[in-house]
Image (tube, rainbow, N blue to C red):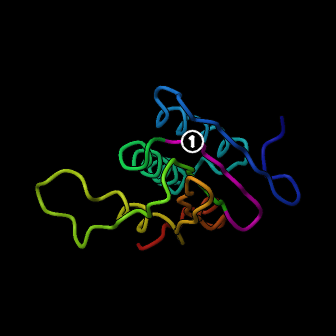
Amino acid sequence: MSVGLPSGSQRRRLALVGVPGAVAKGRDFTRQALRDWGWDKTETSEDTLLLVSELLTNASLHAHGCRELVLAADESTLHIEVHDGTTTPPVRHPAPRRGIPGGRGLYIVERLSDRWGTHTYGTGKAVWAEIEASRLRFGMAAGR
């Protein structure tokens, strides 16, 4: 298998319904995709794994579990989507409370991604985040 993005774009899907250890499996799936696309050698690739972990954890804890992880990549953007089992939008707490665990997931998503949002469909929703490909190639981080 050759390393690097194919001309055009590529989309990878990982079904997660009923899968034990969905967060770890999603991270491994993402790590392999980043490696295949040649985007695994910067600090932004580590940020991407944390971003995927946060999205999957939020779906597991607050949205009736993860249904699917979708990664779509082209020459300019990595688009990450986590599909879950509720149409209720995620809620970003006004401010994380010092010394109290939890409530930081969407702050992390906001900080590490270039854009993020949600869209609903049928009985679920997708929470998505995007990272500019230039950051994955050269290591520039959002919000820093």
Placement of 125 over or under 67, stated as above or below: below
Q: Residue at x 42, y 49 (%)?
A: 63
Front residue of 38 and 68 = 68
Which quadrant holds the C terminus? bottom left
Where residue 110 sits in the image (x, y, percent)? 42, 68
Mark 1, secondary structure of its residue: strand
Q: Look at mark 1 in the image and give the residue it sits on.
A: 67
Indicate whether residue 70 is drawn in magenta.
yes
Placement of 103 over or under 84, stated as above or below: below
Which quadrant holds the N terminus? top right
Residue furthest toward the left?
99
Q: Which residues are magenta?
A: 66-77
Front residue of 33 and 115 = 115
Indicate whether residue 130 is drawn in magenta.
no
The three-letter amino acid code for the residue at tag 1 is Arg
Residue furthest toward the right?
7
Where residue 36 sits in the image (x, y, percent)? 72, 42
Residue furthest toward the top?
20
Where residue 57 sits in the image (x, y, percent)? 40, 45
In which image quadrant can residue 79 be found? bottom right
Placement of 31 over or under 124, stated as above or below: above
Relative to 15, 103 lies left or right: left
Relative to 115, 99 lies left or right: left
Where residue 41 sits in the image (x, y, percent)? 59, 48
Placement of 19 over or under 54, stated as above or below: above
What count of labels does the image hold?
Answer: 1
In which image quadrant can residue 75 be found? bottom right
Q: Residue at x 13, y 54 (%)?
A: 100
Local crowd size for mark 1, using a 10 Å CA cut-off: few (<14), some (14–19), many (≥20)? many
Residue furthest toward the front?
122
Which secondary structure is most common in the magenta stretch? strand
Q: Residue at x 65, y 38 (%)?
A: 14
